[in-house]
Every structure is written in C-alpha cells, then in structure tokens.
Image: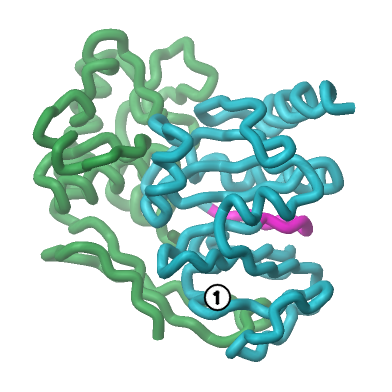
Chain colours: A green, B cyan
Amino acid sequence: MTVQASTSFSFGISSFVIPPARSRHRSVIRAQVEPSEKSVEIMRKFSEQYARRSGTYFCVDKGVTSVVIKGLADHKDQLGAPLCPCRHYDDKAAEAGQGFWNCPCVPMRERKECHCMLFLTPDNDFAGQEQTVTLEEIKESTANM
Amino acid sequence: MAVSVSTSSIPSLNSDRSNRFATSAISSSSPGLRLSSYSSSLLFPLRIGTGGLSSSSRRKRILPVVKAKKQTFSSFDDLLAKSDKPVLVDFYATWCGPCQFMVPILNEVSASLNDKIQVVKIDTEKYPSIANKYNIEALPTFIIFKDAKPFDRFEGAMTAAQLIQRIEDALKIKQ
C-alpha cells in the first residue's frame, strides 16, 4: 500500500482512490491527504464574503472554486496562512510569513487580479453568476481527487 | 471535477523518489483516474512497452489492452532529449484550480494533436527542482519544448481551441 503523506493534519479526511482494475497493473490503495474540514469551512466562508465585498464572482465551473478553496485550506493547515495555491514557491514558509501571496493577495487587493480563477470580475469569460459555494459542492466536485 | 481521459499518451511526473523518473501514459480505459496520481505509485523502473530498453525492471508489468506507453527516463532532460516530437509541458500543482480545469482540456488537445506534440505534466510540488530550473511562478505554466529547448511559454487556463491554436502557431515555424 503506497501512502502519500504530507505534513500533519488534525481533521484530515482521507479519501481512498481505488483505480479501476482493468487499467491497473496491480491494485493500489493510496490515501490522499486532504486539508482539514475546519480550514475548508473557514476558507469557504472567507471566499463567499470576499467575493461579495469585491464584487467578484465564482467560476462557472465550481470545481475550480472548490479546488482553490481546498488549496487555501491546505496551506492554512501547513503554513498557518492561506498562501495562494496557484503558484510555485522556492520557500513556502518564507512566503507565507512575508504575506504578498497570502489570500487575498496583493494583485487581487490592488487590481482584482486572481489567476486562481477564484474571484472573477463580471467581464471575465469564465465568471459565473454566483458568489456562494456550499460545502456540499466543494466535497462533490473534489471527490475524485 | 471529473477527469476525462483520451486515447493518447500523457506522461506525468509526480514522484520525487530519486533521479529515476517514471512516466506513464494513460489510455482511454481508465475513467476517473487522476493522471497525476498514476505514476507516483510506481517506484521501480518500468518495462518499456515498445522496444524493451529496460530489461532490469523488478516488476512484471501487464500492459493494458488499450494503448498506453510507458517509458523510463533518468531525468527530465533525458525525456526531452529522447522525444521525437515537440513537448508541451504542463507545470501544475494538486490544489491549483485552473490546473485541474486544464486536465480534460489537455486530454482533448493531446488526442487531436497526437502526432504533432507530446504532452507531459509535471507536479511542481513533487519536482520543485525542475520548476525552479525553468523559473516557474504562476500555475499552470505551459512550456513548449522544441529540440529539448524552451520555445514558447505561457500561463493560465484556456479553452482547448485556444491551446491548440497556440501550439500550432508555435509548431508552424518549425515546418
């Protein structure tokens, strides 16, 4: 059994991905480390509030919204701050301490630029009509990750 | 988000065990299978499906019925060098929304442009050294490699049509 382990988590929800037998050479059960449900809920609430406050909307594909919210929650768990999940960093801890890329990041605060496609201005091709996302939606759209 | 898989091969590098890179191609018979999680479970050198370069594989591989191509590379540079086609590399991260958004789009593009370009995905969290080498910042970042060198580079999610257009524009110059 191969386990992908990350750093510690408190309420970790492990979802087991069992690939279809016909396409796998051996059966592998792997635990996918997930952000804590508490952090996901915190980032979900934050996202809804901030979308309202900034006049931005979630992506038409709520899967994108869900993945980003989980990414923020994951960084919050690991680093103590919701570092932008759509960036590659040399030193995540340093970046989280520095703050430029902590959500809401400076580009978002200054220019409403969110390359994570979490907060989209109405003119954006991918912008939907909603400023809400439920925990159910998040769970469903990230169930197979 | 559902992952739809095409018939063409999309190797992905996401296991940072050693210098040994295991890439694997996913065939159309594996619905719901995360491409990026597939090869991270492969710890051993893989048997080559076409030509048997690696005879020292410790694991007997049973090839799936549908088309899939597995190859072993000693490094990312090796992968680039051995490719007979230009390579589109997708630098991504697990919890990057736009990166996941691009998964089915990459499948589609890889299928349509199967003979023109090879699509490879690199998990920047599992292979940070490669990401650093190419100064990856925003995710997803796509780099088209021609003759093992970066030729074109762009960031962000886009539609399949836009991606195909971008790739064809880059490849046009070669022809």
Is B5 a magenta residue?
yes
Q: Look at the numbered disc 1 and give the secondary structure of its residue.
A: loop
Q: What residue type is labelled 1?
A: Pro
Residue drawn at (49%, 45%) of the image: B100
Is B19 a magenta residue?
no
Quick check: can you spot residue A62?
no
Judge whether A70 appears above or below A133 on screen.
Answer: below
Give the left or right position of residue B174, taking residue A53 as reference: right
Q: Nearer the viewer, residue A133 or B113?
A: B113
For the N terminus of chain A, the quadrant is: bottom left
For the C terminus of chain A, the quadrant is: bottom left
Give the left or right position of residue A107, taking residue B57 as reference: left
Q: Mark 1 lies on which chain?
A: A
Extreme-right residue of the structure: B175
Could you say where residue A144 lies in the image, as x and y percent from the top left? 46, 62
Judge whether A77 appears above or below A116 on screen.
Answer: below
Q: Which region is colored magenta?
A: B2-10
Could you say where residue A143 lies in the image, as x and y percent from the top left? 41, 60
Quick check: can you spot residue A95?
yes
Q: Quadrant of residue B172?
A: top right
The residue under label 1 is A19
